[in-house]
Amino acid sequence: MALVRPLLFQVAGYQNSGKTTLSLRLIQQLTAAGLKVATIKHHGHGGRPEVVESKDSDKHVKAGAAVSLVEGGGRLVIQAENGSWSLSEEIDMLSFFKPDLILIEGHKQEPYPKAVILRNEDDIELMEKLENIQVVLCRDPELVNILKDTAVPVLDMEDGVDWITTHISNNL
């Protein structure tokens, strides 16, 4: 069975730039508009993400299972262990659920279409380091004026949410 590739869009920026806040707002708006959204969040804080210890699924993985799946009441929880997961593997896994969109938070070096969040002037360097930037969102309103001649739209955070929602809807 061939999987249909969903639209991919990234939210990128340095730590504490507002990626999660923006992602949550986008998820709310896009699902309210009737889209099925899946997300990938890069756990950039070092180590492994938290799992519920001492539950059966964790015991299965600790015993050597590569993947443990728990289902109950319509909720499906998957815990999988691998040496490391590429973003491509994570996208393939989520594609099984047939979302309209996979929203990727982090993984800023990947080549997918992205919004970049700038906290202050120090973050402007990201515009040179990253590829496939569709829009730049500024936490500091003065940055909008400083970057007004940029080739991509440069917006404040509030206007950026609406821009991204429209951009995604137009590309589905």
Image: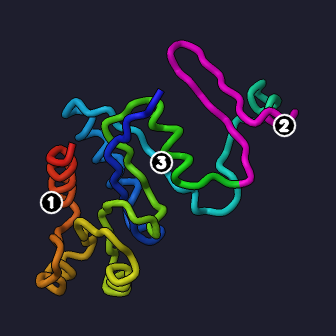
Question: Residue 28 is drawn in which quadrant?
Answer: top left
Return the x and y of residue 76 as percentages of the image width and height.
56, 24
Q: Secondary structure at mark 2?
A: helix
Q: Secondary structure at mark 3?
A: strand
The residue to which callout 2 is attached is 62
Left or right of 142? Residue 62 is: right
Q: Tell me which amino acid carries mark 1.
A: Asp
Q: Tell me which amino acid carries mark 2.
A: Lys
Left or right of 10? Residue 50 is: right
Boundaries of the magenta span: 61-83
The residue to which callout 1 is attached is 159
Q: Are marks 2 and 1 in contact (CB under 8 Å)?
A: no
As drawn, 97 above or below 159: above
The residue to which callout 3 is attached is 40
Q: Secondary structure at mark 1?
A: helix
Q: CA distance from mark 3 to mark 1?
A: 24 Å
